[in-house]
Image (spheres, helix red, strand yellow):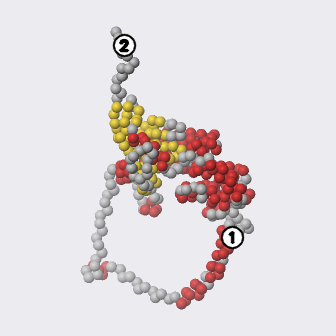
Amino acid sequence: MDSPGPDVPGPIPTRRRRLRAVFAADVANFGGMMTIDETNTVDALSITRRVAIEELAIHRGWLFGMPGDGIFALFESTVDAVRCAMRIQSRLAESPKLYYLKLRIGVHLGEVLFQDDLPYGEALVIAARLESLAEPGGILVSASVVDAVAPRIAATFIASGVPTLKHSPRRIETFRVLPPPPASASGPAAPLDSTTAPEPVPPQAPPPRPGSAGASALPRLPKASPLVLPNEMPAVTESPPADAALPMAPAAFLAPPETPAKGDAPDETNSPKTGATDLDEASLGRLVPLLATHLGPVARVLVRRMAAESSDAAQLIRMLAQEIPSEGERLKFLTRARTALNGSD
């Protein structure tokens, strides 16, 4: 019996399409971190992967790939995908061992093509592009994700524009995902984890008009006290001496060396604890990985060059922060850099 030739095609593989939420994540500036300190970076990556795998299992996500420093997963529920992303970022932010390693996450909802149980398709590409556009430690999702989860999840969605996606003609509106505001700012609120809307508040009856029968029930407002200014004028005229001290603000801003208060150091822009004595090799080494999270391997060169220009640690931190383009990331770097130097004493 003749055997089929090698050019005879085999059986057609099984293909199917499913609507899925695609989860893509990777470490920001991972190559730069490996260049500076590969041992600690690999340890931090292992912790990050363990956290992600645990949360994917809790939120019923299917992990189908971890190439390099990346993590790719699929979710049948878009709500589970976004909640998983928020939980991963929250746990990583609370870990003191991962203060300089930041994960970027992108989530997109679209059709996924399955062939031999492996996912393919444009939805995976779009999720990867969103992840590359997300801020370090942030989450970026598409408009289709917001439409699916906005009524059902407690989160804040901020429009981030319509970026140009690499190798894709699609124009997709993107949104940053932030934790919900605290209950004290907007009143007590429970997480919206169901498809039922909260019960409507019954409208209140309008107050009676002055000519109606219920007008007498309205409280009478007290008469306003007369505004008397002459007696208060001498207190105002005594303020110029305080203005005269304004030229001394730079010296006061640096804090007098007689009373250095260590407890006040984190709240001041220029801390008395970060003087020239802090700029040793150990302190500069602590600044390099913090800056490399935002700028990559060039952070080592910048720290060395600017340390030669300024012997004051507070001024050095400000100079390095100016190299970070994002204002939010710049403030995070300032806080962590001051904490790293002050905690070294």
Residue shown at 42% from the left, 40% from the top: 124
Work out which residue is located at the far left of the displayed protein and give it. Answer: 212
Left or right: residue 231 versus residue 23 is right
Q: Quadrant of the C terminus?
A: bottom right
Residue 153 appears anywhere in the view: no
Residue 109, compared with residue 332, is above or below; it is: above
Q: Secondary structure beneath disc 2? A: loop
Q: CA distance from mark 2 to mark 1?
A: 92 Å
**Location of residue 208 (image quadrant):** bottom left
The location of residue 319, given as percent across then percent down, is 63, 59
Number of dots carrying numbers = 2
Residue 97, compared with residue 232, is above or below; it is: above
Residue 47, compared with residue 198, is above or below; it is: above
Can you identify the residue that label 2 sits on? 3
Q: Secondary structure beneath disc 1? A: helix
**Please, what is the three-letter code of the amino acid marked with disc 2?**
Ser
Residue shown at 38% from the left, 31% from the top: 115
The location of residue 164, given as percent across then percent down, is 43, 50
**Location of residue 183 (image quadrant):** bottom left
Q: Which mark is residue 109?
A: none
Dot 2 or dot 1: first in sequence order is 2
Which of the two marks, 2 or 1, is nearer to us in this view? Answer: 2
Residue shown at 55% from the left, 89% from the top: 231
Work out which residue is located at the far top of the displayed protein and give it. Answer: 1
Residue 291 appears anywhere in the view: yes
Can you identify the residue that label 1 sits on? 251
Give the camera-side residue of 209 and 301: 301
Work out which residue is located at the far bottom of the displayed protein and give it. Answer: 230
Give the camera-side residue of 167 and 26: 167
**Location of residue 35 (image quadrant):** top right
Give the camera-side residue of 101 and 303: 303
Left or right: residue 108 versus residue 341 is left
